[in-house]
Image (cartoon, rainbow, N blue to C red):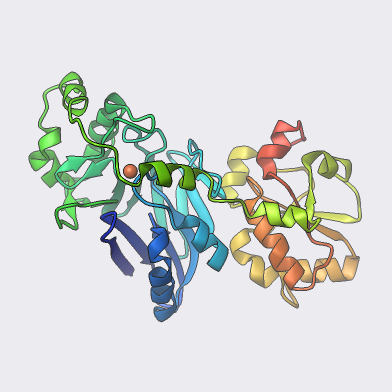
């Protein structure tokens, strides 16, 4: 397995590059914008294909690399369902999995540092974001932070993981790189409390200054910019209403790019075909399923996904591959639902 812990010394952020093999699919956790060139160089050197970029929460101390990685690799950007960030193309909730070839991360909702904080468990290790740090915990005094929720996340979820589980946080300011659940339970000074009230009291009296980057990073991380705006300007977007008007039309092939778990959870548009985004390149190339479908039937290809981000990238790729009829449903299934569009399971 490939497991790389990468450090940004300006914000003391750890990012993690994961892959099951050289030449295979890769995933990155908590990338920092200024380091994107470095990540992509490493991805290339290891002959990897970056397919997913995950943020554990909306960061206040650095600008996320999610947008730049999306623009340069067309990877899927992932955050928890509570996030306000616009760059996200796949939102996950507790109990779901984030998967790539040979690796899956189990999703734990661990709010407290922020209300959109998640941890990700991969076999013998856990990526804790800023919920649990090495001998510390993430502050809870801004961004809808809540010490009570954080106590529950740490004591009720993270400390319930097996003792030997390795803890990989999103930051360290002292030079530590890894810890374990047992070590943190025993030696993390913030966790040596007798009750939730004692923890709340402790966290409410830290009196920390705001992070230097906060006024810049939070707004920048909320509005990274959508892939869909450009696609709409080119005339390749349908509103949910327009899409409803052509539903069932024999000259249209509606293509669902989401993963199986998303389809099961949120439902599908009736009559649509399933062609997951990670297999897009094969599907739109010569001999690919969508390429041949469009060519032999003359059907118009209409992509959709959860929020319109993956489908916007798919439209561009399909247009580049010569599928001139390709378009997508702007805003994805989320907008479709809000407009009252029909769904099946
Ligand atoms: Fe944070």
Q: Nearer the viewer, residue 60 or 91?
A: 60
> Where is 285 relative to 232, above or below?
below
User: Picture quarter containing residue 285?
Assistant: bottom right
Quadrant, the C terminus? top right
Q: Nearer the viewer, residue 262 or 222?
A: 222
Q: Is residue 345 visible?
A: no
Residue 168 location in percent, x, y? 25, 53
Horizontal side, residue 50 vs residue 344: left or right? left
Count of marks placed on residues: 0
User: Picture quarter containing residue 316?
Assistant: bottom right
Residue 204 location in percent, x, y? 22, 25
Q: Residue placed at 73% from the left, 67% from the top? A: 318
Q: Residue placed at 40% from the left, 41% from the top? A: 215
Residue 322 location in percent, x, y? 79, 73
Quadrant, the N terminus? bottom left
Quadrant of ligand 1 in image: top left
Horizontal side, residue 279 vs residue 175: left or right? right
Q: Residue placed at 27% from the left, 54% from the top? A: 125
Residue 236 location in percent, x, y? 79, 56
Q: Is residue 106 visible?
A: yes
> Where is 48 relative to 207, above or below?
below
């Amino acid at each position: 397995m490939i497991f790389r812990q990468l450090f940004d010394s300006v914000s003391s952020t750890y990012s993690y590059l994961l892959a099951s093999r050289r030449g295979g699919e890769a995933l990155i956790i908590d990338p920092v914008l200024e380091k994107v060139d470095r990540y992509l160089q490493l991805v290339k050197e290891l002959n990897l294909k970056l397919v997913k970029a995950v943020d554990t929460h909306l960061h206040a101390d650095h600008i996320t690399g999610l947008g730049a990685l999306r623009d340069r690799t067309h990877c899927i950007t992932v955050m928890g369902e509570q996030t306000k960030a616009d760059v996200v193309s796949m939102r996950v909730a507790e109990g779901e999995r984030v998967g790539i070839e040979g690796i899956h991360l189990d999703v734990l909702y661990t709010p407290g540092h922020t209300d959109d904080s998640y941890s990700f468990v991969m076999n013998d290790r856990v990526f804790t974001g800023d919920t649990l740090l090495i001998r510390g915990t993430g502050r809870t005094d801004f961004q809808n932070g809540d010490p009570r929720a954080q106590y529950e996340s740490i004591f009720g979820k993270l400390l319930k993981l097996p003792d030997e589980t390795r803890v990989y946080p999103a930051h360290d300011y002292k030079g530590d790189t890894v810890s374990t659940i047992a070590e943190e339970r025993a030696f993390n000074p913030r966790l040596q409390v007798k009750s939730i009230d004692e923890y709340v009291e402790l966290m409410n009296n830290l009196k920390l200054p705001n992070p230097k980057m906060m006024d810049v990073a939070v707004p920048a991380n909320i509005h990274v910019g959508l892939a869909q705006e450009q696609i709409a300007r080119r005339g390749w977007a349908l509103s949910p209403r327009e899409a409803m008007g052509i539903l069932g039309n024999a000259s249209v092939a509606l293509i669902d790019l989401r993963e199986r778990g998303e389809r099961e959870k949120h439902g599908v548009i009736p009559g649509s075909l399933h062609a997951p985004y990670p297999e897009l390149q094969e599907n739109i190339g010569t001999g690919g399923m969508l390429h041949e479908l469009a060519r032999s039937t003359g059907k118009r290809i209409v992509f959709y996904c959860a929020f319109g981000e993956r489908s916007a990238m798919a439209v561009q790729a399909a247009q580049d591959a010569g599928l001139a009829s390709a378009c997508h449903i702007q805003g994805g299934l989320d907008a479709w639902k809000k407009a009252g569009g029909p769904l099946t399971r």
